[in-house]
Amino acid sequence: MTEPCRSLAGQAILITRPRHQAQALCDGVIARGGEPWLYPVMEIEPVLHDAELLQRLATAAEFDLFIFVSANAVVHGLQALALVGGLPGDIPLAAVGAATARALQAAGRPIALVPETGYTSESLLALPELQQVEGQRILILRGEGGRARLGEVLRERGAEVVYAEVYRRQRPEAGGLPTPDWRRIAAATATSGEILENLLALIPDQARRWLQQRPLVVVSGRIAEQALRVGIDVEPE
């Protein structure tokens, strides 16, 4: 998966994304001749009726910038905002990466800021428009317990940062997952550190030994470092 035209003919690839977000990756594997095996080690649950969240979102018009950290933040953030009057039309929107930007575009929302390359908090923070934010009020829409880096740096630069945690990530029960033929799997994927943690927690012991002998396809250096610490070989996407 490191080369655009790399063939996966005859290879079974373990797809670990949440079920509702796995289709594009499955399609990519199929397009290269591989066989995707869906093993969703994370579930996404919206947080729509939390009183504190809705009270925070009711003040949306008071912010200078909204930052959506993921496609899930877009979907569930817009749902929650709809309960308190909707997203103000005159506030610029920022997306951490291309997938998040596509989710905003699909919802008919114009995007003011998105990195041209990369899809991490660091990529967004590198944009010139976010270097001088002193005195600005910024609302970050994310999942519960998301990375703190984005908000910390913006605060260091003088912004007032407020979080709206509009969904939560859940680890499914191992008994509710499909049972792959681990011997057939040629490689696995991990698109976040938490997905990697869940994968290691949910697979049986014999599959863990398998995983340490197969490449794990990751999407960032941070996840690669996490995998290497537990003895798993990695291959960047």
Image (tube, rainbow, N blue to C red):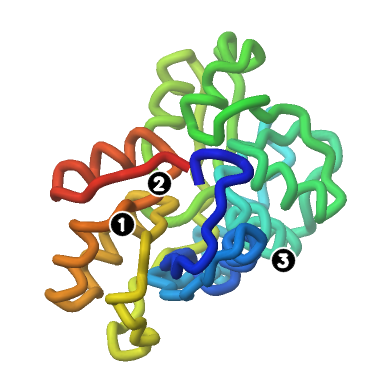
When the figure is inspected, residue 80 is found, relative to residue 217, above or below; the finding is below
Which badge, 1 or 2, is on the more N-terminal residue?
1
- Residue at figure coordinates x 70%, y 64% from the top left: 79
Q: Amino acid at mark 2?
A: Val
- Residue at figure coordinates x 41%, y 57% from the top left: 189
When the figure is inspected, residue 7 is found, relative to residue 168, above or below; the finding is above
When the figure is inspected, residue 213 is found, relative to residue 177, above or below; the finding is above
Give the residue number, with chain letter if any, for mark 3: 83
Q: Give the x, y percent position of residue 19.
A: 53, 73
Which badge, 3 or 1, is on the more N-terminal residue?
3
Which secondary structure lies at badge 2?
Answer: strand
Of the numbered discs in the image, which one, if any, rests on residue 148? none
Of the numbered discs in the image, which one, if any, rests on residue 196? 1
Nearer to us: label 3 or label 1: 1
Give the residue number, with chain letter if any, for mark 2: 218
- Residue at figure coordinates x 47%, y 13% from the top left: 157
Q: Amino acid at mark 1?
A: Leu
Q: Amino acid at mark 3?
A: Leu
Which secondary structure lies at badge 1?
Answer: helix
Q: Residues within 10 Å of mark 2 (few under 14, many from 20)?
A: many
